[in-house]
Image (cartoon, rainbow, N blue to C red):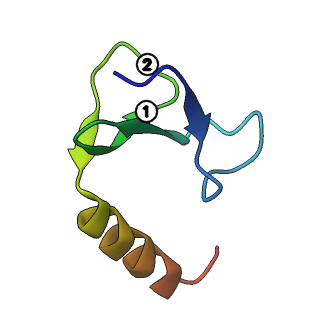
Amino acid sequence: MPGQWRKSSYSGGTNDHQCVELGRLTSGVGVRDSMDRDGGHLTLSGAQFRRLVERIKQYPTP
């Protein structure tokens, strides 16, 4: 588990309840729900995380 998680820059503002946090893991990048920090996390390799970010960038902002 990483020592520090940070809110994704793709998440909304401080009061947004649909946010994710990112953390650097020894096995890649951890992604978790910022409102359920004890609920576990998804681990992505560096390549998988880069592909995810590229896919997210393809969607228009609401």
Q: Are marks 1 and 2 in contact (CB under 8 Å)?
A: yes
Q: Quadrant where the N terminus lies?
A: top left
17 to 49, vertically: above or below: above
Q: Would residue 6 appear left or right of 16 to someone viewing this image?
A: left
Q: Quadrant where the C terminus lies?
A: bottom right
Residue found at x 34% / y 69%: 52
The residue singled out by tag 2 in the image is 37
Give the CA separation, mark 1 to mark 2.
Answer: 6 Å
Secondary structure at badge 1 equals strand
As shown in the figure, which amino acid type bears the numbered disc 2? Arg
Secondary structure at badge 2 equals loop
- Toward which corner of the image does residue 14 lie, by quadrant? top right
Q: Would residue 6 appear left or right of 55 to someone viewing this image?
A: right
Where is residue 37 drawn, in percent x and y? 43, 19
Residue found at x 55% / y 41%: 19
| Mark number, residue 33 | 1
Where is residue 5 drawn, in percent x and y? 53, 30
